[in-house]
Image (tube, grey):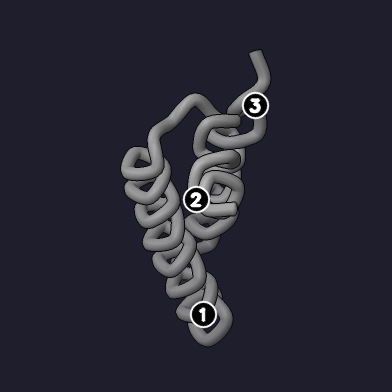
């Protein structure tokens, strides 16, 4: 049960639990930054015109093939 909860997914992307925690934590922080840029853009459309979409595209590029060998 513990293995399934904590280790199965990190192993599926060839990471240890700690490596996966760091990756996911950084990813979450980047999502917060993208959300902030989008929120500012919603109020002031002249700012951060492509920032959030570029950040999301970059994050997708880093993750869409993880674990597929």
Which element carries disc 2, helix, strand or loop?
A: helix
Between disc 1 and disc 3, whose residue precedes? 1
For the view shown, which residue lies furthest in the front direction? 1
Closer to us: 39 or 46:
39
Distance from disc 1 to disc 3, alpha carbons, whole Å, reads 29 Å
Residue at 65 percent across and 34 percent down: it is 64
**Residue 16 placed where, x, y %?**
39, 34
Instruction: Return the disc, 2 or 1, that comes first in the chain's sequence.
Output: 2
Please name the residue that numbered disc 3 is placed on.
65
Q: Is residue 11 left or right of residue 16?
A: right
Q: Is residue 19 above or below residue 21?
A: above
| In the image: residue 13, left or right of residue 48 | right
Which one is in front, 47 or 5? Answer: 5
Q: Nearer the viewer, mark 1 or mark 3?
A: 3
Measuring from the top left, give residue 68's x and y in whole percent. 67, 20
Q: What secondary structure is marked by label 3? A: loop
Residue 55: tell me if it is visible: no
Residue 45: x, y in percent?
A: 55, 75
The mark found on residue 39 in the picture is 1
Labels 3, 2: front one: 2
The residue nearer to you, when weighing 6 against 43, is: 6
Q: How many C-alpha atoms fall within 10 Å of the one at disc 3: few (<14), some, or many (≥20)?
A: few
Whether residue 20 is visible to the viewer of this picture, yes or no, is yes
Q: Secondary structure at mark 1?
A: helix
Q: Based on the displayed image, in which of its 4 quarters is residue 37 positioned?
A: bottom left
Q: Which residue is under mark 2?
A: 6
Count neighbours of disc 2 (C-alpha within 10 A) and say few if under 14, some if 14 to 19, many if 20 or more.
Answer: few
- C-alpha gap between disc 3 and disc 2: 21 Å
Q: Percent position (x, y) of residue 57? A: 59, 43
């Amino acid at each position: 049960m513990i293995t399934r909860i904590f280790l199965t997914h990190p192993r599926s992307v060839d990471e240890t639990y700690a490596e996966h925690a760091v990756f996911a934590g950084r990813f979450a922080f980047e999502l917060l930054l993208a959300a902030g840029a989008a929120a500012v853009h919603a109020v002031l459309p002249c700012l951060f015109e492509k920032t959030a979409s570029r950040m999301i595209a970059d994050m997708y590029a880093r993750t869409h093939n993880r674990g597929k060998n």
